[in-house]
Image (spheres, helix red, strand yellow):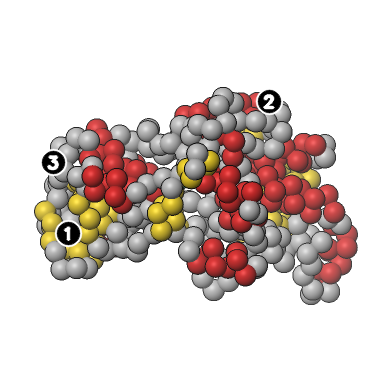
Amino acid sequence: MRAAVPSDTKGQLVPSSVTTRRDVVVVGGGQAGLAVGYFLAEQARDFTILEAASGPAAAWRDRWDSLKLFTSARYDALPGLDFPGDSDRYPTRDEVAAYLEDYARRFELPVELDSRVRSIRRSDGSYIVELDDRSYEAEQVVIATGPFQVPFVPPIAEGLDPSVVQMHSTAYRSPESVPDGRVLVVGGGNTGFQIAEELSASREVHLAIGSRQTPLPQRVLGRDLFWYLDTTGLIGKTTVSRIGKLMRKREDTLIGSSPRRARRAGIEFHGRAVGTAGSTVSFAEGADLDVGGVVWATGFRVDHSWIDVPVFDGNGRAVHERGVTNSPGLYFLGQLWQHTRGSALLGWVKDDAEYIAQQVALFRPAASRELEAAGTSSKN
Ligand SMILES: Cc1cc2nc3c(=O)[nH]c(=O)nc-3n(C[C@H](O)[C@H](O)[C@H](O)COP(=O)(O)OP(=O)(O)OC[C@H]3O[C@@H](n4cnc5c(N)ncnc54)[C@H](O)[C@@H]3O)c2cc1C
């Protein structure tokens, strides 16, 4: 360990904090961070996993109470540890959280909780990873901060009267989260359908669907959908392959939720929600609806603004090849379609994690520094 004397944004010296050296810093302790941690531990690397939340499996614990996975337990395992119980069942949110917690403990992965990374920058051929109270210096950094980061609510939400209770799906826990009376769920993905169906047992529910997603059954002829995707090799089609590109275009698929079942449950469908005034929401087809509550199941945005390394395109998207960026030793893991459809799924993140761990092992810092000094970025 060695002391550093950083300055604040006004350039004034702030009390010295500690800078610790590690071979590799992994940012994010969800399934992606743990999976790469498993392989780094196998290599006996000196590494740490920095996790912003105060407890393990934070992203899963933040999801609604009754969430059931759309992947069966057979396809929910990280490297080296089967998901417990009947492999044909669809585990709950809490089971996944318990599994991830057990995983980190069992493989003694060095997860540091309450450790939000505030910035990453390049300095003298290393990365400086800064937290509120300390920093790390590492030659290699893996960003595993998740594909679903910042809840997105469309600007029309602002037009709703304060008497309308509204929340993003991340704040929805159970029907008790929403007041009695007519509720609108906005968003026709798996999340919107699951929440709408749960609410429909106790109140009048409307569902606004901006763009239709192809419904796929969870099971076909007694087998899980992912069994077919796995057996046919479709799940492993890469983002640059012809089939991969096609699948990516149609990525929005509803797994296990069916519009027909939702209609039978009494849910009324609308097109895209396009405007609000008072307690009224208007839809693309021209209809208006008075509501008492709105759940915005409208997805997420990724925020990498805290990474001060030039590896992003004009839209702030990380530029990489299978997670490997042009900045020597900087990797991403767990992104949607990072390499295949499975990249951001529990059961397949191990493939990318193993690949990134291999890149870590192959990395030659001196060679990278020389190339960097010559103005040429390298990928190992
Ligand atoms: C509603 C929903 C249902 C899903 N269902 C399934 C399913 O059935 N099957 C399946 O395989 N997949 C499912 N997924 C997809 C995927 O498995 C999850 O999104 C999973 O949580 C992604 O894991 P991750 O480790 O990449 O990211 P996350 O689980 O999001 O973990 C990232 C971690 O990074 C931390 N972090 C973020 N920023 C920082 C920072 N600056 N410093 C330090 N730490 C930071 C966060 O606190 C978080 O713990 C689902 C996703 C959603 C949203």
Q: Give the distance between the C-alpha atoms of the residues marked 3 and 2, in whole angstroms.
A: 46 Å
Q: Which mark is residue 181?
A: 3
Mark 3 residue type? Gly
Q: Earlier in the sequence, mark 1 or mark 3?
A: 3
Say what secondary structure mark 3 lies in: loop
- In space, the residues marked 2 and 1 are separated at their CA atoms by 50 Å
Instruction: Judge whether 363 appears above or below 22 on screen.
Output: below
Q: Does label 2 point to a residue whose CB lies under 8 Å from ligand 1?
A: no
Residue 346 position within the rendered picture, expressed as x and y whole percent measured from the top left: 58, 42
Type of residue at label 2? Arg
Residues under numbered marks 2 and 1 in contact, where contact means CB atoms less than 8 Å apart:
no
Query: Which image quadrant: the C terminus?
Result: bottom right
Q: Earlier in the sequence, mark 3 or mark 2?
A: 2
Q: Is residue 367 left or right of residue 333?
A: right
Q: Is residue 248 left or right of residue 187?
A: right
Q: Which residue is mark 2?
A: 106
Callout 1 touching callout 3 (CB < 8 Å): no
Indicate the amino acid at tag 1: Val
**Left or right of 72 in this view: 68:** left
Asked which secondary structure carries label 2, the reply is helix
Front-lying residue, 214 or 355: 214
Question: In the image shown, does 147 or 76 lie closer to the viewer?
Answer: 76
Which residue does the image show at 34% across and 64% down from the upper left?
Answer: 211
Q: Which residue is mark 1?
A: 281
